[in-house]
Amino acid sequence: MSEYLSEEEQIEKMKSWWGKHGTLVMVAVVVTVLSIVGFRWYGGYSEDQVHDASRAYVAFTDAQQEAKSAQLDNLAQAHGGSAYYVFALFHQAQVAAADGDFSVAENFLQQAVEAAGDELLEDLARIRLAKVQRALDRPDAALKTLDAVATSGYKSWVLETKGDIHASRGEVKLAHESYQAAIGSLVEGDQRPILRMKAQNTAPFADQYVQLSDNL
């Protein structure tokens, strides 16, 4: 039925799908990264240190939001080089962004980039940071942040985010090219329906790229 929908209806349908399933997609990415990073990080720490960091992270996650700042400070002081600390920063950035405090979210994510001792985790922080910088209407900074991502496994996410930035600036041709490149870099079995819909909605009509009436 999507071929019969207007551009506005397709955008609303896309937003609705992402609202229902987007969190699950990102959680899957985060869990995968945490598993890989956790394995690497474990090799450099004693079993006692790992358990201590794990308990400190559980204390952070169990604390009420108003008490998380103190728990985050505890993690920073005792386990500042751990993946647990970085994911605590991710949590605080997510809460700040949900409240519309994008400057606060940016600060947490910059700390995450600096604290991450693993390239996978550092680049994940960069991708999230770029999204916040886009929300702060700083597209050039966001693109520069994405250019620093070196992990090949994130290539499709980087390209999609670049496409979002170009779309927000009315650069429809660049947005479409980024989305198409993102699709081309997908690993086998990765469907990413939202990405494919973005590519379709920015595709040229009669060899002309048309300005979208709303950003995806």
Image: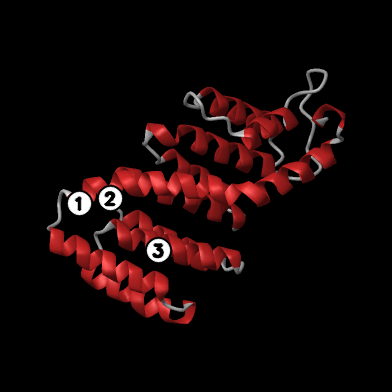
Q: How far apart are marks 3 and 2 (CA)?
A: 16 Å
Residue that mark 2 sits on: 38
Mark 1, Cα crowd under 10 Å, few <14 / some 14-19 / many 20+, is some
Q: Do the residues labelled 1 and 2 touch (CB within 8 Å)?
A: yes
Residue that mark 3 sits on: 89
Q: Nearer the viewer, residue 135 or 41?
A: 41
- Residue drawn at x 61%, y 36% as measured from the top left: 163
Decide if residue 5 is on the left or right side of residue 214. Answer: right
Q: What number is the disc on residue 42?
A: 1
Q: Can residue 145 be seen in the rendering of this structure?
A: no
- Helix, strand or loop at label 3? It is helix
Horizontal and vertical percent position of residue 18? 66, 46
Inspect the image, locate mark 1, and give the three-letter code of the amino acid beneath it: Tyr
Mark 3, Cα crowd under 10 Å, few <14 / some 14-19 / many 20+, is many
Q: Which of marks 3 and 2 is nearer the N terminus?
A: 2
Q: In which quarter of the image is residue 61?
A: bottom left
- Residue drawn at x 26%, y 51% as measured from the top left: 117
Q: Earlier in the sequence, mark 3 or mark 1?
A: 1
